[in-house]
Image (cartoon, rainbow, N blue to C red):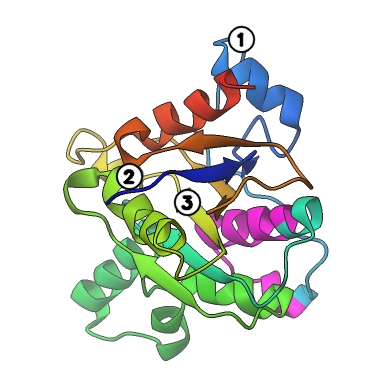
């Protein structure tokens, strides 16, 4: 893919760091760490019944989408690209366990376990109308996911796109059997063809993208 693009300062959430920008700068410099826990944001800006049954992954996704919209004041018709390396893995594990033990699946639980559930819930919570794409990148590669968003802006098909990455804590039974860092984390950033004037951004090409979501995020903060 030819052409560079700009990435805004991300809005992030993870246990122990939450949404504070200075915390994330300190984390990128090795001064703070993400807690490996199933803690999740309160998302008090949503309706109680809406948030009651949401997973850590979905709550983190809703939170960072809320924050990026508040920070950038971007149009609610902007498209979203959601990237996750493991999706609703905890909910999927529980559904599989129930299926094996009880030979049944509750429809409500299944509807919240599908891969696109977190980004779909974010669009509902924030009243977004631009549509979304959910990407499961091959070989645990963040580059494959970002390529979907970057291609659209670099080619001029879209002026701006909201990129969302999110992964929740891996269930304990998967420890040592899952080829992926067990770090619960979500962030959202705006990808654009032209340099925005309303908020900070940095220029990237696909060759600049770090394959690890953690290293990619640290690279953005180190550029500030």
Disc 1 crowd rating (10 Å Cα; few below 14, some 14-19, many 20+) is: few
Q: Earlier in the sequence, mark 3 or mark 1?
A: 1
Stretch of the chain drawn in magenta: 49-68
Residue matched to label 3 = 166
**In the image, is residue 149 above or below residue 195?**
below
Up the image or down, 55 lies above or below 173; here it is below
The residue tagged 2 is 142
Q: Residues within 10 Å of mark 3 (few under 14, many from 20)?
A: many
Residue at the far bottom in the pictured view: 107
Q: Earlier in the sequence, mark 2 or mark 1?
A: 1
User: How far apart, in angstroms, are the residues tagged by discs 2 and 3?
Assistant: 11 Å
Q: Which residue is mark 1?
A: 31
Viewed as shown, does residue 123 lie left or right of 83? right
Q: CA distance from mark 2 to mark 1?
A: 24 Å
Depth order, front residue of 138/55: 138
Point 54% across, 44% down: residue: 6
- N-terminal of the pair, mark 2 or mark 3, is 2
Q: Secondary structure at mark 3?
A: strand
- The residue shown at (52%, 36%) is 203
- For the C terminus, give its image quadrant: top right
Residue for point 26% across, 67% down:
97
């Amino acid at each position: 893919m030819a052409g560079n693009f700009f990435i805004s300062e991300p809005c992030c959430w993870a246990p122990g760091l939450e949404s504070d920008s200075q915390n994330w700068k300190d984390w990128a410099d090795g001064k703070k760490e993400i807690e490996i826990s199933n803690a999740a944001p309160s998302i008090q800006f949503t309706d109680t019944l809406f948030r009651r049954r949401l997973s850590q992954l979905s709550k983190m996704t809703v939170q960072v989408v809320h924050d990026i919209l508040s920070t950038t004041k971007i149009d609610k018709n902007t498209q979203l690209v959601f990237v996750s390396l493991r999706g609703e893995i905890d909910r999927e594990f529980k559904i599989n366990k129930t299926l094996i033990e009880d030979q049944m699946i509750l429809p409500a639980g299944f509807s919240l376990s599908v891969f696109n559930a977190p980004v779909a819930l974010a669009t509902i919570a924030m009243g977004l109308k631009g549509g979304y794409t959910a990407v499961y990148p091959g070989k645990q590669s963040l580059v494959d996911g970002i390529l979907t968003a970057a291609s659209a802006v670099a080619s001029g098909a879209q002026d701006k796109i909201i990129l969302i990455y999110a992964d929740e804590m891996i269930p304990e039974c998967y420890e040592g059997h899952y080829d992926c860092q067990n770090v619960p984390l979500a962030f959202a950033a705006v990808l654009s063809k032209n340099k925005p004037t309303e908020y900070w951004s940095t220029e990237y090409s696909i060759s600049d993208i770090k394959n690890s979501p953690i290293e990619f995020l640290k690279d953005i903060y180190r550029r500030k």
